[in-house]
Image: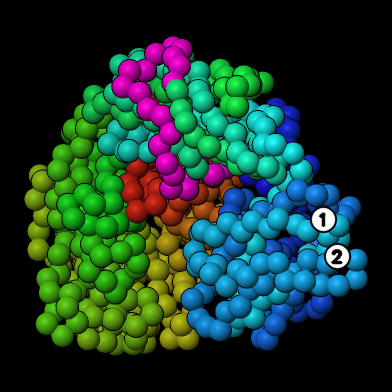
Amino acid sequence: MTKALHLLLRSGTITYTVLALSSAESFESLPAGPLKEARTSIGTWSADTGNAQIQPGHAKTGQQCLRLAGEGERTATLTLTEPAAKGTALTFHAERWTKRDPFRFRIDAKERDSWKEIKNADDTLTGAFKTEVRLDLPTGTSELRFRVTADTGVMIDDVTLHQPGPARAVLVETVQPVCPAFIREDYNPVLGFRIVVEGSEGTVKLEGLELGFTGTTDLTDITSFRIVTGTADPSADPGTTIAEGKKAEGKLSLTTKHELASGEHWFWISPTLKETASLDHRIDASLFRIKAGGKVLEPAQPSPDGTQRIGYAVRLPGDDHSKSYRIPGLVRTKSGTLVAVYDIRYDSSGDLPANIDVGVSRSIDRGQTWEPMRVAIDMGDDPKHGHDGVGDPAILFDPSNNRLWIAALWSHGNRAWGGSGPGMTPDETGQLVLVHSDDDGKTWSKPTNITTQVKDPTLRLFFNGPGAGIALKDGTLAFAAQYRAADGKPWSTMISSKDHGETWQAGTGVKSDTTESQLAQLADGSIMINCRDNRGGSRTIATTRDLGKTWTPHPTDRQALREPVCMASLLEWKDALWFSNPDATDTRRAMTLKRSTDQGLTWPEKDARLYDSRNGFGYSCLAPIDDSHLGVIYEGKSTMYFLRLPTTE
């Protein structure tokens, strides 16, 4: 099985048996760590100690690759299952670890008992496995030797052995990961398909496609569509458009002139939605057949089970001249208005210190449309540092007086996570600031600095946890918070106000190596804190009955709720706890909504709903919309996506 399809199977989006090239090797099935010897479908890989490793977290597709690294020359050898016949070729994707020199990458072939260099790959690029290397193997080649001289090495992935013969398409199959289609988004990969071409000689032309959008709630929701090249990963950027159409129909035919070399080729069907497409509608697509090299091929399933939700892209890179939007928060006011907050990261997706303001978006129609962005907090420009950034917002609605609050971290110069130190002044340490709105988020007050109320001068930093705060049953307001101790260790905690935001008090730390927590009040009146745990694997969970002065570990502490080290959302609503995060331990993927009806003691898998399977930045925030819908705003890659999720599911 190829790595890409293995990954999709793991995410639960493919449920049928798939075919794969027996001559393709990724490295997904091998254990991460040092490589000494590993037998694969194309041959046996071997390396001396310290020369090579199976590298997790980096791949052309999937989760890992082969990395050659170390001082001096490092080598790995591939002994082919059988000597190469005339016309055999081998391809792979490569990436330099960094741009630092020296860098020298060569491949040798062994015929009989002698080695001969057959490829100079010194032009391998950094980033995203952009370099594809093709080796035409000398007849009788029994071994290949990969040699690199570099400070930090080279990575290779998706190694494919192409047998002799004319190129010919032999297989087409469809996949349908959970990928919502968003209003305002240019690329919506709702259905993928891969075409397998065998034979090392020449190419085959993809001549036509028969596809359709049967299963879509309303075909007029789609204004146009295109078919683009890509990879097995639907979160990767799209490639070339090979065909497009203006009208979505149940079945239609398109002609193409796309050349396919030997190997595996991925394509995605991407519709563009009209602004008025209902968030309660669904999108579906099918691929019925292709024509390649004069041959017609049909997938076993034109459209796998499932349809795609329609959502709204609240913020996209480039909106209002900002390159990135991150760190979502969301609340519903008494009038039913949805108010979202986030970082406006003007120059890049990087964290503070940077040119960052806090933005606000409002929706008065249950998330169907969103008003133009407002800037809620802008700390101005600092002549010395160029800007005073403010970000990582959390939003809270006080139902007693209809006031909205936003808490955020102000970094005066380099006074964010890494550059903040002991003390209390903006020149010494990051500042916790608040703004409020009394008109449902249309206008915002000037910032109030509460650092002196909540921070111990010995701490290196103290600020809120991003997402949403809560109002307790007795009217107390509470935000999750976090701090760096004098030794640099991070701790989660909370702050609270018994006078509706006039004054604030801080609790004590829950556990070291925790950050970015969220709060919920349980049925017995206690407060649950649910924390990002930087050890990875699962969440830290605790409760308090005294506003954070003391904490008691919850029975599920570090035992429930998988996480890859990421912010998550916790919401108490309708006699249940609701939780959203990337439901994985390897990377930030598989955005999932979970529900607990027993105060967080169990989170039944039957109640879990995967709402976006793709890799992304992974932060999210939940809020009620009406009696039967939850809203979630979450990060794609520098985007703010919104979905309306029916709880009846």
Q: Residue at coordinates 59% horizontally, 50% vertically from top-left?
A: 61
Instruction: Name the amino acid, label 2.
Output: Glu
Q: Which residue is mark 2?
A: 111
Q: Secondary structure at mark 1?
A: loop
Residue 54, x across and y down, in percent: 71, 64
Instruction: Name the amino acid, label 1.
Output: Thr
* Front residue of this view, candidates 485 and 65: 65
Q: Quadrant of the N terminus?
A: top right
Magenta span includes 248: yes
Residue 647: tell me if it is visible: no
Label the magenta part by its dominant secondary structure: loop
Magenta span includes 35: no
Which of marks 1 and 2 precedes in the sequence? 2
Q: Which residue is mark 1?
A: 139
Residue furthest to the top: 250
Q: Residue at coordinates 47% horizontally, 48% vertically from top-left?
A: 236
Q: Secondary structure at mark 2?
A: strand
> How many angstroms separate mark 2 from mark 1 (CA)?
8 Å
